[in-house]
Every structure is written in C-alpha cells, then in structure tokens.
Amino acid sequence: MKPTIIFTGGRYIDPASKVDENTDVLIRNGRIAEVGTGLHHVDAEVVDATGLIIGPGFIDLHSHVNSIAGQRLQAMDGVTTALELEAGLLPVERAYTQAAEEGRPLHYGFSASWGMARAAVLSNLHFDADLVSGLSMLADPHWQADSSPAQLTRWLGLLESELEAGALGIGILQGYAPRTDPREYLAVNELAARAGTPTFTHVREITESDPTTPIDGTEEAARAAMEFGGQVHHCHVNSTSRRHIDRVLSTIDRAQEGGAKVSVEAYPYGAGSTGIGAAFLAPERLPAWELTPSNIILVTTGERIRDEAHLRHVREADPGAACIVEYLDEDNDADRDLLARSLAFPDSIVASDAMHVTWPDGSTDTRQWPLPPGGRTHPRTAGTYARSLRMMVIDHEAWTWSEAFRRCSLLPAQVLENTVPAMRKKGRIGVGDDADVVVIDPATLRDQATYIDSTRPSKGVTHLLVDGQFLVFDSELVLDSYSGQGLRAEVG
C-alpha cells in the first residue's frame, strides 16, 4: 500500500506548468493528488518542507550503474530514474528481467546496444545484458571493422528485434569504432526513425582532433537527424568536444535551427570514464585527445598509468578495466568555463554517465549501506546533479531553479515521451503526474564525491520519492525501498 503524504510549506516548482510558489503538495497512490494551501487528509503523513524546494525527481538518460549500490548513490543525488541509453544492453529482455528479480531503488530502462549487436555478428560474441563484462569487447578489432552487406542486415535485424522487445531506443558507441563507414551510422538512424525511436550517440572523433576521421562526429549526428527526421541525442558533449566545445555547440545550434531534432547532454567534470581498451585510448591515438598515458587512472586501484608500455600492458591484460581519463584541467579557470558553457547551452540536458562501483575483489554491487570501504567509481556517479545545480544555480546564477528542473527532469522526459508512455507523467509534478519527487535543501546542497573518495554521497537531498514511496527520508536512505519500475517503449 503506497503512503499518503502531504508536504507543507515548501517551494513547489513544476517546470512543465512553470509554477514556482510556496504551497502544500498531497501525494496519494503514487501520484500528485492536490497542490494548494491548507491541504488535509485524515490518513496522511505530514512532512514539513519549510525552506525546502519540491520538484520532479531527476531523470538520468545516461547511467551505466545498473546496480543497487550505484542507484543508491544516484538517489542521494536526487535521481529517480536512471537509464542505460548510450551503450545499451543486449538482450534487453534479460536486462529487464534481471533488474526486476533483484529489485531496483530507481526506475530503470535500456536501449538496444549497437555495439553489442555489431560484436555479436562481427566477432561472434555472446552477451548476457551485462555492461561490466561487455566492456571487454572494446579492444576487439573485429567488431570495429566495416560490415559486409549480409552482416549489416543481420545486426540491424537484431536491433530491430530489441526495439520490438521494448528497448527505449538505440545506443550507438560510434566513438568506439571510429573508422567505420558513415553509411552504417545512417542505416542505424534510418531504422530508428522508421520505428519512431531515438538514438543516443557517443559520437566519433571531431575533425579538430583527427582530420582523417571519416566524418566529424557531431556533423554526422546532425546529418542523420536532418536526413531521416528522427530524434538524435548527442551524449556527453563536454567530453567528446573537450576544448572545441564552442565549435561543436555551434554545429548543434545550426542543426536545431534547421529543424533537426538533436538533443544534447553534458556533465560538470573534466574527466571521463570508460574501459581502458577503448580505441581512442590506444597509445598512438592519445595525441589527438591532447593526452598522455599519465592522464589515465585505473579506477579499481587508483593507479596512474606510468608510460606507453604500461598502457599497452594493461590494455592487453584487461581491456575492460574501468579507468578515468582527464581531458580538461578542473583547476584551470578556462577549462572550468568550458564545462559551464556546455551546461549553459540552450536546452542542454544534465546526464551523469555514471559508472558502476567496483571493489578490490572485483564485485560491483551490494545491498550494504553505507557502502563497504574500498569501492571506487567516477565521482559523477554520486555527484553530477548536486554539482550541476550548485554550479549553475547557486554559483554562476545561470539557471533559475525552475530552469534547473527543466534541464534535469522535464527535458530528458520529453526526449523519450513520444515512444515511452510512462515518461508523459514524469519530469513534472502537476496534479495527476507520477510522484517521483525530490525535496532539496538549497542551503546544504553540494556534491561530496572526489576522484580520490569517489563514493561519498551528495548532501542536500532531504527527501526522495520513487513511485510515491520514500527512498530518502530526512536525508537518510530507506534501505528496504525497491520501488523502481522498468520503463519500456510502446511496441508498434
């Protein structure tokens, strides 16, 4: 039985209706039931929200945590929905089944995995809907090659069957197979446009870094959106653009002005995270990224790569090993300003690219809370949203609170709502909408995770409701709350 809850005296912000006022909010049966002053219900739990901000929970379009431990860190950062869309998983039916069997604190969903579909056909690899083990494919050159017409037909058919199973779109790791024929990328986007579903692209290299790239990655994404009229989502524009963010954003702006449905996301960190076997981390490729081996840090041990020989050894021994890649200097004012500009771009969505937590014994999940010592991840897993709000609302005053909720909640819901009916009631908190709610103390809001201490939860999320049930209450995690639901696209 879902509780009946009244938040009293809080600052209620609904980005869909643009209402921003002090009022009460009644939640019943997992929905926003009433909004107004002096609300009363005989069975309600009354929660004083004076001095707090009540808004729709954050929807993360780009989370790789896929675990209880990772989702709990994201919950403390204000997230109510965490979706695996950039990489995707294969098969999605197995991904949904496993998440439902284990239970999830947050709502979840998965795209069809372009990379895994290609690898299944070109490398004869088998996948069991697990990103951690799937990272080992990154160093395999076979799936990164061009497809024959027969191979292209096979893996496009595999993606189509995944869409029929309810996948939320197609995740395209184009940057991990950067020399493939651009016609194949167009073919994937043509399939998605025909199905009426979005694509989520980690773009291939930009021309400033690699003049020999078959096509500039951002131009390619924009071209696909223009040609087929589909929704193309440009993942983590901050990391793939690095110090060329202004040119890349101008490319996206021109495409949008021309009618292309291109959405874009960013996160507020100067370092990314991936598997060390990624093609762009090959020693010979690092200069294009203005990187050296010492800019790469192994997540599990915290060890910094010493030199080219060390990098080659680790890539060969464990290509799926998670690593942190420093592409901007967060101590440099100019580089910090680049991060702020990627977030300030009109309609730029906040998305974390959150990574799973790994412990020294190789495990990646636990129900224990606080998390056991020794776990490591990228700090964006725990701190993306608190850091973004602190930077853009409080420090830079670039966003109002209403705009912040639009970027963190409403816009990501709108990317998916044409094909995912459940999204039409998320990302906003008007009467009748889903009670996925975050209650924030703006005076204490801050991220605490660092590259050294990466699993420290954010502060300032006082309450968090998922499906109308408390997951965070009085700043403490509710340990028996597993009310997350699997979100699927509407088949047909």
Image (tube, helix red, strand yellow):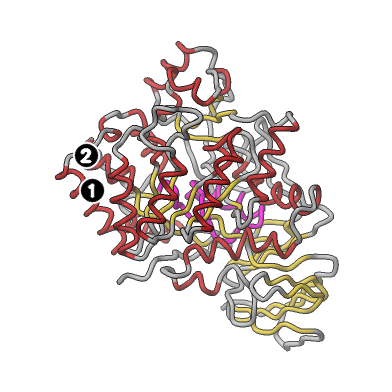
Badge 2 crowding class, 10 Å Cα cut-off, few under 14, some 14 to 19, many 20 or more, is: some
Is residue 69 highlighted in magenta? yes
Q: Tell me residue 427's x, y (percent).
A: 59, 67
Residues at circles 1 and 2 in contact by the CB criterion of under 8 Å: yes
Amino acid beneath label 2: Ser
When asked about the image quadrant of residue 5, the answer is: bottom right
Residue under label 1: 155
Residue under label 2: 147
| Above or below, 318 relative to 373 | above
Is residue 96 highlighted in magenta? no
Q: Tell me residue 280's x, y (percent).
A: 44, 28
Q: Tell me residue 124's x, y (percent).
A: 21, 38
Spatial CA distance of label 1 from label 2 is 9 Å
Q: Tell me residue 190's x, y (percent).
A: 31, 56
When asked about the image quadrant of residue 452, the answer is: top right
**Residue placed at 49% from the left, 24% from the top?**
288
Amino acid beneath label 1: Trp
> What's drawn in magenta, residue-wise?
61-87
